Image (cartoon, rainbow, N blue to C red):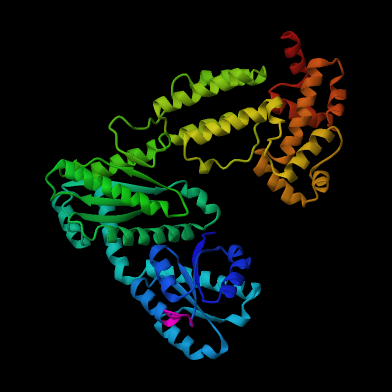
Amino acid sequence: MRQIKTIIADDDYLVRSYLKILPAWKENGFEITGEARDGEEAYRILMETDAELLITDVSMPFMNGIELIKKVRKENKHIYIIVLSCHDDFEYVKDAMKEGANEYILKNTLDQDSLSQLLVNTRNSMEEQEKKEIFSDNTGDSMNRKGLFFNSVLSGAVKGEEKEAAAKAAGVTGSFHNCAVVCMYLESPEAEEERWTHFEAEQQCQIFYQRLCRELEEHFKNESYRTEVIYLGTGIFCCFLDLSDIRKSSVMQQKLTDTAVACYKICKKEEHCYRICVSNVCIGAEALVQAYQQARDMMHVSFYDRREILYYQPDCHVNPDLPDGLEECRNRIHKAFAEKDKDSFVEEGRKVWDLFRDRKTESRLVIQWFRRLEQEMGIDIQRDYRKVTSLRQLESWYQKDEEYLFCKKKTQIPENINKTVRIAAEFIQNHFKEPIGLTEAAQEASVNPSYLSYLFTQEMGIGFSNFLLSQRLSCAGELLEQTDLKIREIGNRSGFNDYHYFSKAFKKRYGMSPAEYRRHHTRHQ
């Protein structure tokens, strides 16, 4: 849930203190980022921050609430304003609503429940207001025409004289004979669909687009060169720079760098992560298409290069096929796992990442390859591959796979772990041979089973059931190596009361049956 930044203005310290401690703020996605004792202080804070909600008393010293609202509305019509009042402030409330307040509430009715309901209504109203701003006639038609023009040029649908006529019809005045592109894109937009519908995700992108346009317009108000900011869909935003009137290449480059930094600062304010990719300054009839393609190339390269702003480099591009030698690495990884050779497992992993990095393989292929490898080794850790945005992330997952697959390391409990999780983990280590489960561990830790399950996964990096299973399989492996007990007896002593389940789980984890495992390790002793 997006956090709505809130300022509270009231000259009564006790009122401000009481409001701040109510849980309703956090529960409904509101964050108090500032407080003020009078209207002047509130106005200064509002002008220095990007707060979206102002809750203000009407009766304050130096500048009262009415004057504050009037002044704020002249500067920023987008801030949502709620007025706090007493019973005898009715005339003030009427004036406040006239000057642009959105809502009012009586102070003596404020408690956890009334504030919670107020905030629910406020969020709904703010979202409706943002929708109206996004699709308003005064900017929407112009933006849509320009967006269609740039999409047509980039796709090659219009060229030459036809392009000039289309530019004029769309209200695009620059020639873009010398131009550059700063491309911003939302990382893993597909993953946001877990929280939003497709329509809601597009709304969020449109809201960001409006903010981007406003702030860049303010940034460029004293500049002579033209810029067009376009939303291309699926979380991609482009700032097209027309540098045709500039003669010196050094000046063009400086303007491009300045624009890239401005876009970066705007994106850093957002809750979601945006990547910034920048073209060179391109020249000629096809400069616009060439600059955009350069920025797009860097978007693909960002899977390997995590710098905050990626400037185009001619030798940087991704390859649409897997590197040579990859299948040999896969086979050696399986062999290392089967032989419990952790060092070889780690070394082969390094080779894999180096192969991908050297060739800069297309990210989609890398993720598919890694997902298949995990499936082959029976790793059932819950992961959302749609959220993978870098090779470094897969490297980290491979390290966790090592912990998961090689018993000695994965059974360790981290030193700085949550106390509740430590109690549950130690309970498992001490009682895994018994018929225990999540319910018994939750009772030991004095928490709800569902909460323990969530907390355990977050803290340990492995689910509760998998941790318990790891303890039992580790014990079974040691008994197979060190004793002559019958396999069924080993299963029982390791905490498995079902022989068929034990055999199936063991083979899934080690890539061989318990009998094969014993024979293999007997040969290597």
Q: State the residue at coordinates (40%, 68%).
A: 44
Estimate the x, y position of residue 175 in percent, counting from the top left. Answer: 15, 52
The magenta segment is 59-66
Q: Nearer the viewer, residue 426 or 245?
A: 426
Image quadrant of residue 30? bottom right
Pick the quarter of the image with the C terminus. top right
Q: Is residue 385 above or below residue 159?
A: above
Give how far across and how far down residue 490 sits, in percent: 85, 23
Query: Overall secondary structure of the magenta stretch?
Result: loop
Q: Nearer the viewer, residue 46 or 122?
A: 46
Location of the N terminus (image quadrant): bottom right
| In the rendered image, the vertical position of residue 397 relative to residue 114, given as above or below | above
**Residue 179 image point, x, y percent:** 20, 47
Residue 460: horizontal and vertical position, in percent? 67, 39
Q: Is residue 420 covered in magenta?
A: no
Q: Is residue 417 left or right of residue 311?
A: right
Residue 65 is inside the magenta segment: yes
Q: Residue at x 29, y 41 (%)?
A: 293
Instruction: Name the side, left or right, on which 268 lies relative to 242.
Output: right
Looking at the image, residue 168 sits to the left or right of residue 216; the answer is: left
